[in-house]
Image (spheres, rainbow, N blue to C red):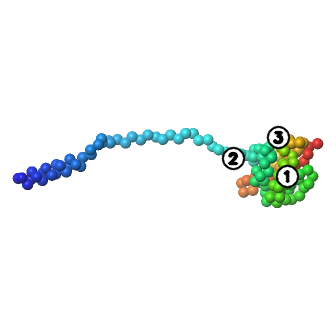
Amino acid sequence: MKKYIFIFSLVISGFAFAQPSGPQITEIEFKPVLRGETELLQQPTFEALMVSAFKAGNAERIASRFSDNVDLSIDGKEDLYSDSQSEQILKTFFLTHKPKDFKVIHKGKSGQSEYFIGELSSDFVYRVTINSKMIKGVNKITSLTIEQND
């Protein structure tokens, strides 16, 4: 009998150690995580990009939208230039004619082509004509004319 009491006490003490010692979690509480509203960031339109670039005299930003070859005409000097040559010519123009303002006065679109005419205020007022074509989903400038407005 002593044997049975000894085994029984061992079993009881084993159960005592198996019990959790801290507070028991009976329910898990889930709290929904709410995300704040996110703003959709839109890419600026081709026109907005050109307006800001011309206002700032940023030839690099304008050149980022040049096609491989650009029909460039600045103050009567015109030719077909590579995109890098066109950028250098435009940089030189902006160095000698610091832009004050630029505004679009007319624009149009036909199929994959888009154009707009603007006025660039500098030491004189210049008429700027930009012709672009959609190439692989991006407007690329194919022709750029800058001439003094009389």
* Residue 118 visible within the image: no
What residue appears at the point 44 percent right and 40 percent down from the top-left corner? 31
Tell me where residue 27 appears, x and y as whole percent.
34, 41
Residue highlighted by disc 3: 101
Q: How many marks?
A: 3
* Residue 32 visible within the image: yes
Residue highlighted by disc 1: 92
**Within 10 angstroms of label 1, few (less than 14), some, or many (20 or more) residues?**
few
Of the residues under marks 3 and 1, which one precedes in the sequence?
1
Tell me where residue 55 appears, x and y as whole percent.
80, 43
Q: Identify which amino acid the numbered label 3 is placed on.
A: Asp
Q: CA distance from mark 3 to mark 1?
A: 18 Å
Whether residue 39 is situated above or below residue 130 in the rendered picture: above
Q: Quadrant of the C terminus?
A: top right
136 sits to left or right of 95: left
Q: In front of the other: label 2 or label 3?
A: 3
Residue highlighted by disc 2: 43
Q: Identify which amino acid the numbered label 1 is placed on.
A: Thr
Q: CA distance from mark 2 to mark 1?
A: 28 Å
Q: CA distance from mark 2 to mark 3?
A: 22 Å
Tag 1's secondary structure? helix
Residue at far right of view: 150
Determine whether label 2 and label 3 are within 8 Å by CB. no
Of the residues under marks 2 and 3, which one precedes in the sequence?
2
Q: Nearer the viewer, residue 20 or 115?
A: 20
134 sits to left or right of 150: left
Tell me where residue 90 appears, x and y as whole percent.
83, 52
What residue appears at the point 53 percent right and 41 percent down from the top-left corner? 35
Q: Identify which amino acid the numbered label 2 is placed on.
A: Gln
Tell me where residue 73 appears, x and y as whole percent.
88, 53
Residue at far front of view: 95
What residue appears at the point 86 percent right and 59 percent down from the top-left corner? 80
